[in-house]
Structures are given as structure tokens and as C-alpha cells.
Amino acid sequence: MGRTTATETTKGRVGEGENVFRMCALSPRLPIPLPPFVVYNPRMRRRLLLIVLASFILHFAFRNSHFALPSSPSATEPPSQPANSTGLFHGCPPEGRGGGDPDLNRRKNRDLPPPPTATGGRPYLTLDLPSFLRLRPKAVMKMKDRPRRQWTTAAQQEVAQWESRGAQVEGYLLNFKQKMQAPESCNCYSKTDRDIHLNLTATPAGPKTKSMVMEISPRLMPQHPKWNLTTLQQLANRGARLRISGWLMYDQEHFYNVGKSRGTVWELHPIHEIEFLDDAGQWRKVDEW
């Protein structure tokens, strides 16, 4: 065998380095030139080869694997069922249809009652009616009648502190209506499925401008057949004191009606329980009357 000269050895090392460089150029992860100390150091060359091979393996593994980011739901996928709702009612989804504010409609259609608190306490916050008339969260009030999707984060967080709870309010039935109530987007503009609107006041025959609106949803009427106009008229005729429980909701669509047809934007909507004070001074459920 002939002796290998220093010049040939150097050329061989440079040639190996060039091959490694070509491999690096093919890699999407390491498009970098090789410094001289890598070319002439066998240990560094081996490490670099391992890095290049690992880069190729990871690149193709992740490109072809199922660990991809979830795609946005398509327009054809059904909307997810919101919390506290049974879903479709006579073909109408909780977000309603035909316009309006879908986020507000989901709150109007919470036909499942408020759950107990985390500590197992009562699900209903008890406040007197005048307290609701004074309840005006600053960030929420600034939104006026804008749809919920246009609200600031501060306003959404502020209203969520109240709307996540049910409430219980006592008062006297001043007014109620259903037939004159126009179809609404929360009920998909149904001509038969309509809310019954109640105006409750702190004192008998109190002014409407100091009343709080509470609504019976058509979603709950099949479960409560006595929640009808005839029963409400009987309660109004006897001047009964009522205790109404339901979801607390801020109906910003009536922001400019405050001081006219109502005293506050806050509502109990939908109602989940109606009681009245009987002649013996005991609370009785209307369902059992």
C-alpha cells in the first residue's frame, strides 16, 4: 500500500465535510454552512450527522402524524348545546333564529334551573326589587344596547358574575301580556311559542317605571300548565304577593326602555318557579294551587 500524503488526507476530510454540508442544505431545519473546526473534527461530524438525521425524522413524522391543531368547526356543523338548556324546542335552537342577539337568546332559553352553588347552597340570590332597580354595573352600562359580541371583556366579566346565578324576587303583579307580545328571535319568531311578560312592583299598583320584568318562556309552559293568563289574572285580582325565582339576566335590548315601560334592564328570564302568599301567610306554589 502506498503512503497517504498529508495533502490527500486533507482533501479527503474536506470532501467529507462537503458531503455533510450538502446533507445540511437538504434539511429544512439546518440550512447552515459548516465551519472549518467541524470539517476537520470527526466527533463533531458524527454529532452533526445525528442532528441532521433527527431533523429529517421529526420533520416527516410531524408532517404526517395526527397530532395536528384542531380545525375550526365548519358552517355545516351543528352548534354546541349550551349549558342549562335542553337544546331544540319545536325545532328552535337555544340561540334562536332570524336575527337578534344569539348570545342573549341563549340566556333567555336556559330552560334548566340554576344549579346549587359549589358548596351546595341555594341556587337563588335573594334581593328585594328596589335593589335590582339600583343595580347598574359600570362596564355593562357603557355597552348600552350593543349585541353581546361587541361588549368589552370587562363588561362580559362583570355581567357574568350576576347572570351565572339565579335570583328570587318578591312583589306584586302590575301587568302581564302574551297575545300582544310580538314574536321574538329567541323563539325563532314563532306565532304560537311566545313569552308571557310580567311586570312586578315592590308595592301594590306601583308605577310601571319602577317595575321589573320577568318572563315565562314557552319552553317551560308544558311543564307548568297553570302558568297561563287565566291564573295570572286570578292572582292579580286578589292582589297576591308573589315570589318569583329564575335566571337573572341583563336584557340590553331594552336599555332605552328604562324609565318608560320598566325600571331596570335586569330581568328574571326565564322564570323557574312562581309562588304566592296565601291567606294563611304561607308561600304556595302556583303549580299546586
Image (tube, rainbow, N blue to C red):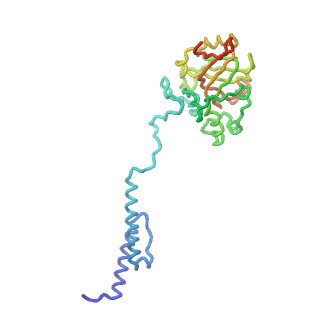
Q: Pick whichever, 126 or 189, lies toward us.
A: 126
Residue 9 position, x and y percent, is: 34, 84
Q: Nearer the viewer, residue 251 or 163?
A: 163
Q: Quadrant of residue 141?
A: top right
Q: State the quadrant of the C terminus.
A: top right
User: Residue 49: x percent and y percent?
Assistant: 38, 70
Left or right, residue 259 beside residue 161:
right
Indicate whether 139 appears above or below 111: below
118 sits to left or right of 48: right
Q: What is the x, y in percent for residue 24?
A: 40, 69
- Which of the pair 232/33 is nearer the observer? 232
Residue at 71% across / 23% down in the picture? 211
Q: Which residue is at the far left?
A: 1
Q: Quadrant of the N terminus?
A: bottom left
Tell me which corner region of the image, top left, top right, bottom left or bottom right, holds residue 107: top right
Above or below: residue 27 compared with residue 87: below
On the picture, is 166 further left or further right than 87?
right
- In the picture, measured across the screen, residue 131 lies left or right of residue 60, that is right
Question: Residue at (42%, 63%) from the top-left corner?
Answer: 28
Residue 247, placed above or below residue 41: above
Residue 100 appears anywhere in the view: no
**Snapshot quadrant of residue 286:** top right
Q: Position of residue 188 (x, y in %)?
A: 53, 25
Please indicate, yes or no, whether residue 157 appears anywhere in the rendered image. Answer: yes
Which residue is located at x 67 percent, y 29 percent? 266
Q: Identify which residue is drawn at 73% across, 24% down.
A: 260
